[in-house]
Amino acid sequence: MRKTGAFIAVLLAATLTGCAGALPFVSGEPRGDAVPIEELRCGDGFGGVDPDVVAGAVPDGFESVALHRCEGFTTQADAEGVWAGSRVERFEGDLSELLAALAEPNAAAAFACPASMWIGPELWLEGADGRFIRVPYPSDGCAQPRLDVLDRIEAAVSRLSLVEERFQRGGLIESAEATAAGCTSTAGLLVRTDVLAGVDIDQATVVPEVGATAVPVPPPPLPGADEVTGMRVCRYAPAPLPAEGSVLSIRGVLPFSGVDDLDREGAARVLALFGEAGPAGACEAEATSTVVLHPLPETQAGATVTVELDGCRRVVGPDLRAVVAPEEMLALLAP
């Protein structure tokens, strides 16, 4: 269950000399005035670095009529799948207590601070003229929110009326279409860097530690070309920009874009070509079209093969060794 107005501190280590780095909405520096903008731009929970957003104190002449609280790191499911994004709440009422708490000064810089990161919702004020400002939390000497002021802010918000709540989409993190097709929602390429560097470790793969003992885990096997009955081809390509929100992307990771199938003959030929391919060297060209091959029938281990259709044009199997994709294989897997 989500707790409205919850404030989260993530402790990373013991006390260190010097202050932890300030978040954009929690600053240990003296606060200048915020700059009003035409639209509310929620960040991702870390404040979101947006050059058009200058957080600060309420400027003279800005008449606050509502509070908007933006909580990042939230999710919402719908028919398309599960979206990451921000939950935006709009509060109305007497804002005087809240404004007084937000106007409290920052504390002087401390000599020693815990290495911690505070994560909490952004606070935005809506003006009578329809513009918005983001207001930081008054901070202690370590660029963390003053706990006494946090209590006052939470108490002040609890006395306001929640008049609107909406979800602001970020990126689709779990595609319902991909799940129904038997594919993952995103795909990227994991390659053994020791092999690319020419230092091959004898069959070293995933090595989880059990107590003090390292237990080698061999990669799941692929079926032979004479065993496969077909192949599911999960396709991945850049997603178009959504009508609402922004796309959260990670370099080298592409979203699901569709699925195809290969018959027994095609699947057998792809596996045979994979077995004959030569090793790939280092390459930094980014692929914009990738497929993940699921040989059928699928085993419990679910061994797959990932192929870059452009970019470096590599093929990587369960052991994470990269080989050069043969032209015949690329032609068989072309959309």
Image: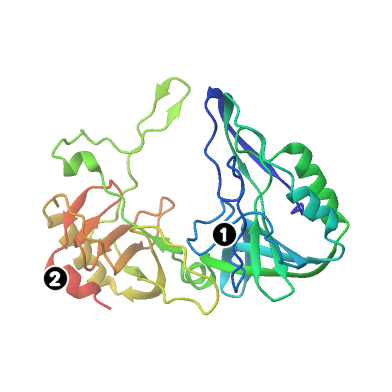
Asked if residue 170 lies left or right of residue 255, the reply is right
The mark total stands at 2
Between residue 319 and residue 17, name the one nearer to us: 17
Instruction: State the image quarter where residue 14 is shown.
Output: top right
Q: Which residue is mark 2?
A: 328
Q: Is residue 57 above or below residue 105?
A: below
Q: Amino acid at mark 2?
A: Glu
Query: Residue 1 location in percent, x, y?
Result: 76, 53
Instruction: State the image quarter where residue 262 is shown.
Output: bottom left
N-term-proximal mark, 1 vs 2: 1
Q: Is residue 16 above or below residue 229?
A: above
Asked if residue 123 lies left or right of residue 254, the reply is right
Q: Secondary structure at mark 1?
A: loop
Q: Are marks 1 and 2 in contact (CB under 8 Å)?
A: no
Mark closer to the observer (1, 2): 1
Instruction: State the image quarter where residue 205 is shown.
Output: top left
Separation (CA) of disc 1 from disc 2: 46 Å
Q: Residue at x 59, y 53 (%)?
A: 45
Q: Which residue is mark 1?
A: 43
What colouring method underlies this structural image?
rainbow
Q: Is residue 315 above or below residue 104?
A: below
Q: Residue at x 46, y 71 (%)?
A: 181
Query: Residue 4 location in percent, x, y?
Result: 77, 54
Q: Amino acid at mark 1?
A: Gly
Q: Secondary structure at mark 2?
A: helix
Q: Which mark is residue 192?
A: none
Q: Residue at x 65, y 68 (%)?
A: 132
Q: Residue at x 58, y 34 (%)?
A: 116
Q: How busy is the neighbourhood of tag 2: few (under 14 within 10 Å), some, or many (20 plus)? A: few
Which residue appears farthest toward the top when viewing the image?
212
Q: How busy is the neighbourhood of tag 1: few (under 14 within 10 Å), some, or many (20 plus)? A: many
Between residue 261 and residue 169, name the one nearer to us: 169
